[in-house]
Amino acid sequence: MKQGTHTIVTLGVASVFALTLGISGVWANEPGYGKEGHGSIGHSAMGEHGAGMMHNSTGHLIRHLLKHEKEIGLTAEQVTKLKEMQLNMDKLRIKSEAEIQVTEREFKALNDDATSDLGAIEAKLQQSGDQQAALRLASVKARREVLALLTPEQRAKEKAEHEKMMQQHKDTDKGHSSPHGGAMKSNPHK
């Protein structure tokens, strides 16, 4: 019986650790994370698209829409609403990530104490998982709200702008490879 409980706790710890690595990626592409505000989720421990799925991130979508507002044909009212949504998402993300970090530290303290009750450890794991799931669900809901702001024509234009941008990234990566696998910047002074 003790072996089974130990296995459950070990699996729980591993799951929370994996979720923690992945969930940080959900919002990692928010301003201030990674170069030029585009994020670095592609380099997360979860792999290229991890739990955050960089190109499905709500923050990425809003920045893309605002960057290409003229090409997409956004109205002033839509731009104002998108900026408000972006601020609300940032506030929620910051608060949620702080709560998750506190819960994770509490879990670690319980787990490090050999006399801790397994029920308390399990409850802390559940709390962390619930907090992370709530954050991800908030991102999904916000993305749907963002897309609901757009007309069908604007969605088509957004998709075309996104595909054009992705093709530019692919073309850049193909034409300027370094021997180490990364893209090299061309020297404008040659």
Image (tube, rainbow, N blue to C red):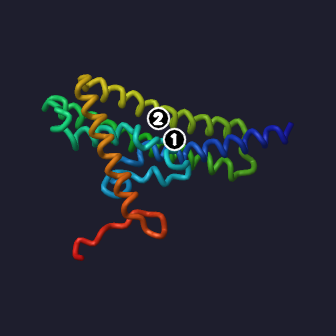
Relative to residue 44, is residue 12 depicted above or below? above
Determine whether the residue tagged by mark 1 lies in a helix, strand or loop. loop
Q: Please name whichever residue, 35 or 92, is drawn nearer the observer in this view of the structure.
A: 35
Disc 2, SS: helix
Q: Quadrant of residue 62?
A: top left
Residue 131's label in the rendered image is: none
Q: Is residue 127 left or right of residue 76?
A: right
Q: Spot the residue most to the front.
A: 175
Left or right of 97 in this view: 159? left
How crowded pointer 2 is (Cα within 10 Å; few <14, some 14-19, many 20+) is rated as some
- Check whether the beta carbons of the residues at disc 1 and disc 2 lie within 8 A of each other: yes
Q: Nearer the viewer, residue 96 or 37?
A: 37
User: Where is residue 103 drawn, in percent x and y?
Assistant: 54, 43
Amino acid at pointer 2: Arg
Residue 136 is marked as 2
Q: Nearer the viewer, residue 8 or 78?
A: 78
Q: Position of residue 187 (x, y in %)?
A: 27, 72
In the image, which is nearer the foreground, mark 1 or mark 2? 1
Q: Residue furthest left?
A: 76
Residue carrying label 1: 51
Query: In the figure, is residue 181 to the left or right of 8?
Result: left
Write the residue at 66% across / 46% down. 14
- Residue 87 seen by the camera: no
- Which percent across, then down, holds residue 114? 75, 50
